[in-house]
Amino acid sequence: MAQRTVLVDRFTALDAVGPYETLGRLPDARTVFVAERTGPVRNETGDLALTADRTLAEVTRPDIVVVPGGPGQTPQMDNPLLLDWLRTADATSTWTTSVCTGSLLLAAAGLLEGRRATSHWLALEQLRRYGAEPTGERVVTDGKYVTAAGVSAGIDMGLTLLGRIAGDEHAQAVQLLTEYDPQPPYDAGSPHKAPAHLVEEFRATSRFILT
């Protein structure tokens, strides 16, 4: 099964690597990172790069599309090359997925209109601008579209889709082998649980301030 993860400059590393570690364990999986140009694509801090082995033009019929998010998503919202590729790939994909603000790129391509979807909590309401119905759920499946909330939720999305494709036991085996058993020292992983002053601080400085 051909999985293609789309990379853009200033992506968030875990958005891409989380699904890679889970969906990459599908039987006969062939995972390839793609971008406008081949070569290294750097994350949001610039100190980590993943290698795109194929250009968008070289890949038109993936089985699974994964769109990570990150600060680099914003300048891509009106990139016709990327948005056209997403529409073309989606036309024949079995699954079209995203992590974090990657869902905004799917929405900008017109793929989430009338569908339930999620994104990073700071960006969630932006989905309405593109006709999607935002939810605060960690992973949302609507037809063949599977969207994940912020960053770490990409692992959950990968396991969810893994179970749908290869069965629950296979997904459980991957969860066990990756020892994905979260026990964080704090219960502040959502805006509903975190200290209110932190939530407001991040809302006030977010690039997604609604006007």
Image: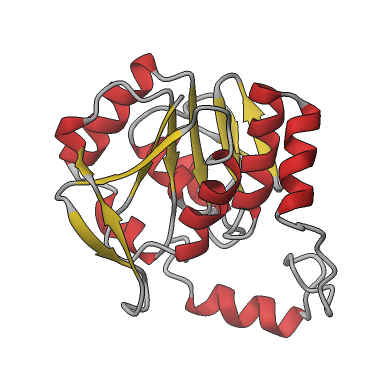
Residue 135 in view, yes or no: no
Q: Is residue 64 above or below residue 31?
A: above
Give 48 or 86, whichever is nearer the viewer: 48
Q: Which of the 4 quarters of the picture holds residue 72?
A: bottom left
Residue at screen point 42% across, 23% down: 63
140 w.r.t. 18: above or below: above
The residue located at (84%, 79%) in the rendering is 185
Instruction: Check the picture and name the quadrant holding the C terminus.
Output: bottom left
In percent of width and height, residue 158 lies at 62, 41
Nearer the observer, 52 or 176:
176
**Residue 93, relative to residue 22: is it above or below?**
above
What residue appears at the point 38 percent right and 66 percent down from the top-left corner? 71
- In which image quadrant can residue 165 be found? top right
> Which residue of the protein is positioned furthest toward the top in this rendering?
92
Residue at the image point whose x is 17% and y is 47% from the top: 36
Which residue is at the front of the view, 179 or 163? 179
Q: Is residue 106 visible?
A: yes
Numbered disc total: 0
The x, y position of residue 8, in whole percent, is: 28, 55
Quadrant in the picture for residue 188: bottom right
Find residue 81 and report its horizontal and vertical position in percent. 16, 38
In the rendering, at what x and y percent does residue 39 appear?
18, 57
Please state if 27 lies on the left or on the right of 101 as rendered: right
What kind of colouring is applied to the model shown? secondary structure
Q: Which of 210 and 99 lies nearest the eye of the viewer?
A: 99
